[in-house]
Image (cartoon, grey):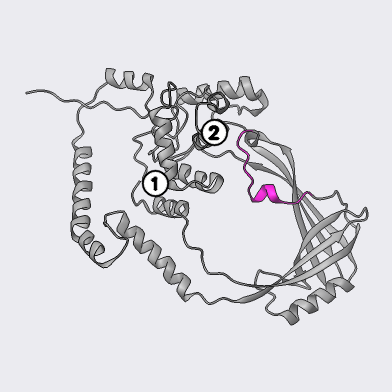
Amino acid sequence: NKEFKRIEFSAVRKKDILEAIENPRKINQDLVNAAITRRFLDKFFGYKISPITTRRTIFGKSAGRVQSPTLKILCEREKEIDLFAPEEYWEIEIEVLDQNGKKMNCSLYKENEDKFQKLSIKNKKQAEQLQNKINTESFSVTDVIKKNKNRSPYSPFSNSLLLQDASSKLGFSPKYTNSLAQQLKDGISDLGALITYHRSDSNRMKKDEIDKLRDIIGNEIGKEYLPERSIEYNEKSKFVQQGHEAVTPTQLNVKPESVKNILNQDQFKLYDLIWKRTVASQMNQSKSLETTYFIEGESIILKSSGSVPIFDGFKKIYNYSDRADTEQALPNIVEGAKIHVDKVNIKQNFTKPPNRYSEAGLIKKLEELGIGR
């Protein structure tokens, strides 16, 4: 005749655990039934399919409610690659000089009224005709478009986002990332837990943690980097279970530099990534001035695009190169300015089949489809 209760906490912090112990709840039979259903599905798939995969394949030791649909996704992509027929197209790379001799890279925009697409130039003959045309025509700037572009910070990490980021930015496999995150969560030396539970499907933080974060940004990074109000993030996936909060440092004031000598190299890299992403998530947007020049000849119009950073915003903390950062810096040119064509190179290409999934890409696909966690 004992009464059992359940305690709930979304992060392994002393404060959260003590609050949970003080506020236990009744056992929720719906959640119990959900666990029983998952166990049934594991057995239903696993007991029937695992013996076949073990017998028929070299690598397949087991099958389950996540592995089986994942295998289907991989097979479908492989089929796409097998059926793919490459198509020839040509690229024209154009380098021009302004009146002060400053270089710009341009692309073909229009010939008369025909706009150029990726596959517009089908063969070498067509490419050479355009090359000759560009070399013989006189060009000047006919239109200058300048607009401000703001870029918002990224949300804190869920497990899926952490695995993808660690893969693309640090080159860690998902399995290795989870292993390192487990070490940081369990605590290293006398540090105690450095991060919250990492197998979380949520990218949201508790309000009191956001308040601490805003204090750090305002006092240590600068008032100009702090937005007027805190930033709310929506969940990336519609299947989020809200059992945990985002993967963040347990103590936001423990900076990566202060624990660098205690952690090994890879532990430090991962903690540094998590800390920076968490802090940047509540910082102001970055701002840049995007500029496009349209450069017109007798029948050809060229286009050149680039950007100039105005305010670094969240990139002061979390700045990894992306497409926007690799855009060229353009010289300041006014409408009507004469432009000299310096180089015109032609290059043969073929369309490529879709890539096979990377581990991080596959995790992203599974998250979109709501398969597994």
Tag of residue 181: none
Give the structural element (helix, strand or loop) at label 2.
helix
Rendered image quadrant of residue 56: bottom left
Under mark 1, the amino acid is: Lys
Is residue 308 or residue 47 the one in the foreground?
A: 47
What residue is shown at x 64% (from left), y 28% (from top)? 225
Whether residue 103 sits left or right of residue 204 in the image: it is right
Is residue 270 or residue 241 the one in the foreground?
A: 270
Under mark 2, the amino acid is: Asp
Give the number of marks. 2
Q: Earlier in the sequence, mark 2 or mark 1?
A: 1
Q: Residue furthest left?
A: 1
Q: Is residue 32 magenta?
A: no
- Dot 1 crowding, Cα within 10 Å, few <14, some 14–19, many 20+: few
Query: Disc 2 to disc 1, how far (Cα)?
Result: 29 Å
Which residues lie in the magenta part?
Answer: 317-329
Rendered image quadrant of residue 336: bottom right
Mark 2 vs mark 1, foreground winner is 2
Give the structural element (helix, strand or loop) at label 1.
loop
Q: Quadrant of the N terminus?
A: top left
Whether residue 217 sits left or right of residue 266 in the image: it is right
Say which residue label 2 marks: 272
Say which residue label 1 marks: 238
